[in-house]
Image (cartoon, rainbow, N blue to C red):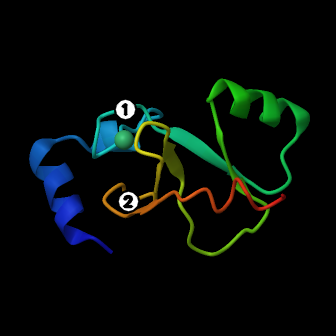
Amino acid sequence: MKDDLLDYLIATDSMDEFLGYEPKCPSCGNKLTPIEYGMPAPETFEKAEKGEVFLGGCTIEDIQPEYHCNNCRRSCFKNLNDYVDEENNWENEDE
Ligand SMILES: [Zn+2]
């Protein structure tokens, strides 16, 4: 999809980091939080309150963000160069 990123990862030998468990926000460098989709289990709610996961809502689509930056309030797709800004749409969904 984004050949630029792939080239960059290969050139800088940072593929392992990219594939690691702690992706960083491309904007602020903050550790990104994995986004959980679907109906959250009670322990998932607890994790979300601690900021360990971000609840993405019950809607599961083909392409959706994988990580959330609590600092930027921004959700990144697997390719971290693609993101959507969070405007509380999902958080207000159930109200
Ligand atoms: Zn950020």
Mark 2 = which residue?
Answer: 79
For the point 23% across and 60% down, the residue is 6
For the point 64% across and 62% down, the residue is 89
Ligand 1 located in image quadrant: top left
Q: Position of residue 39 (x, y in %)?
A: 86, 53
- State which quadrant residue 81 falls in: bottom left
Query: What quarter of the picture does the C terminus occupy?
Result: bottom right
The extreme top residue here reads 50
| Relative to 62, 7 lies left or right | left
Q: Position of residue 65 (x, y in %)?
A: 53, 60
Q: Foreground residue, 2 or 70? A: 70
| Relative to 85, 8 lies left or right | left
Question: Is disc 2 placed on a helix, strand or loop?
Answer: loop
Q: Which mark is residue 30?
A: 1
For the point 72% across and 29% down, the residue is 49
Q: Position of residue 40 (x, y in %)?
A: 83, 46
Q: Amino acid at mark 2?
A: Asn
